[in-house]
Amino acid sequence: MAGCACRCRQGVFKFIQSLRRLVFGTLTKDKIDEELEMTMVCHRPEGLEQLEAQTNFTKRELQILYRGFKNECPSGAVNEETFKHIYAQFFPHGDASTYAHYLFNAFDTTSNGSIKFEEFVMGLSTLLRGTVREKLEWTFHLYDINNDGYINREEMTEIVRAIYDMMGKYTYPAIKGDVPKQHVDAFFQKMDKNKDGVVTLEEFIVACQEDEMMMRSMQLFENVM
């Protein structure tokens, strides 16, 4: 069991590296064909056509993504432990475990403790090829830890602190203990228009669209993929 989990973890890590090149257009056609052959399996998701209609990926891209996902993780799902190990490899100088936990929960839309291919692709489609509003809606739900439809100061502080922990010594300027709190206070001053102590989805979207620096700060996932 441990060996299978390790293989899955290593495989998904390599798969995500290939995914990054695919999504950002750095895989040539020949390279795509080569990686497709290397990851060929006999299975495919029943709803491939439906996924094509629901995402911003082409059928060809979905086939490549699925075959790589299924070949490297035959169970067809990634659990939280594997997800955290993947993220730890991307951020070796910090502690990515807390941020990976929240990110995992955002992808795990069924809240069953695992991310299936369909959930993974739907999330990636939004984050990498969605509209600005779609990306901000997804980010809002990441920050809304308890899923009550609002972001409070404690929730935002948890995510901001997790991001700082993940970046580790590469955070600039050097972090002092109260820096996350200062950033959250600044965000809330701009976002919480009616001063009721929580940020709604519309307040979040409007504030981000009005402030370019805040927009960049909130679209953090794209910088850690």
Image (cartoon, helix red, strand yellow):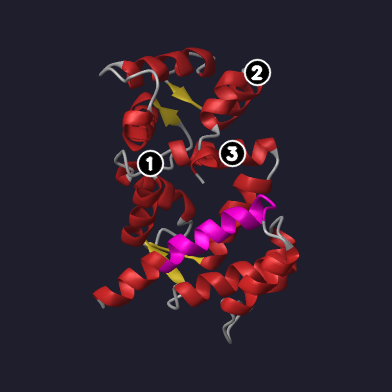
Query: Residue at left 66%, top 49%?
Result: 24
Q: Residue 111, position in %: x, y?
A: 41, 58
Label placed on residue 146: 1
Is residue 195 positioned above or below 108 on the image? above
Q: Position of residue 123 (x, y in %)?
A: 57, 53
Which residue appears at 53% of the width and 38% of the height?
A: 223
Location of mark 3 (residue): 137
How far, Cα to Cα, is label 1 from label 2? 26 Å
Position of residue 139 measured from the top left corner of the image (x, y, whole percent): 53, 38
Decide: marks 3, 1 in contact (CB < 8 A)? no
Which residue in the structure is indicated by mark 2? 210
Distance from label 3 to label 1 (Cα)? 15 Å
Are the residues tagged 1 and 2 within 8 Å (C-beta)? no
Q: Residue at x 31, y 39 (%)?
A: 93
- For residue 202, what is the image quadrant? top right
Which of pointers 3 and 2 lies earlier in the amino acid sequence? Answer: 3
